[in-house]
Amino acid sequence: MSERYTPLTDDQIRARLADLPGWTVEGGVLMKTFRVESYIAGAAFASAVATICEGLNHHPDRLCIGWKQVAVSFTTHDRGDVLTPADFEAAAAIETLPLKG
């Protein structure tokens, strides 16, 4: 099994969360809701998230566009819906996107 998909311990998860402002883990799911300035800005942001995740070959469990917000959540499904380094790698990549909100 690649280290990228090795399940993380609770301590490892807490350490990685420290580098991702606004991201939380609830029920074993890594998640964040991003605030955007309009619905169309949310759609554009979600498209950018999808593009980044496609490039990483690690996709969100949930990518939900709402009124002035986009919710993103991750687990690694092929490892039994646990959190792995790949989930945090994707979250960190999303954090590099410019966001007006």
Image (cartoon, rainbow, N blue to C red):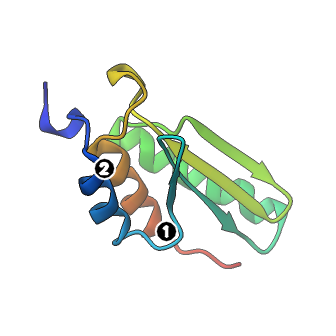
Q: Which mark is residue 97?
A: 1
Tell me if residue 91 comes above or below residue 8 in the rendering.
below
| Left or right of 68 in this view: 21 | left
Where is residue 62, by image quadrant?
top right
Relative to 40, 5 lies left or right: left
Residue positioned 27% across, 64% down in the render: 15
Label 1 or label 2, whichever lies nearer to me, is 2
User: Residue 38 or 69: which is nearer the viewer?
Assistant: 69
Q: Quadrant of the N terminus?
A: top left
Res. 47 mark: none
Secondary structure beneath disc 1? Answer: loop
SS for callout 2? helix
Q: Position of residue 70 (x, y in %)?
A: 70, 56
What kind of residue is marked 1? Answer: Leu
Q: Which label number is shown at residue 10? A: 2
In this rendering, the count of numbered labels is 2
Residue drawn at x 74%, y 65% as measured from the top left = 41
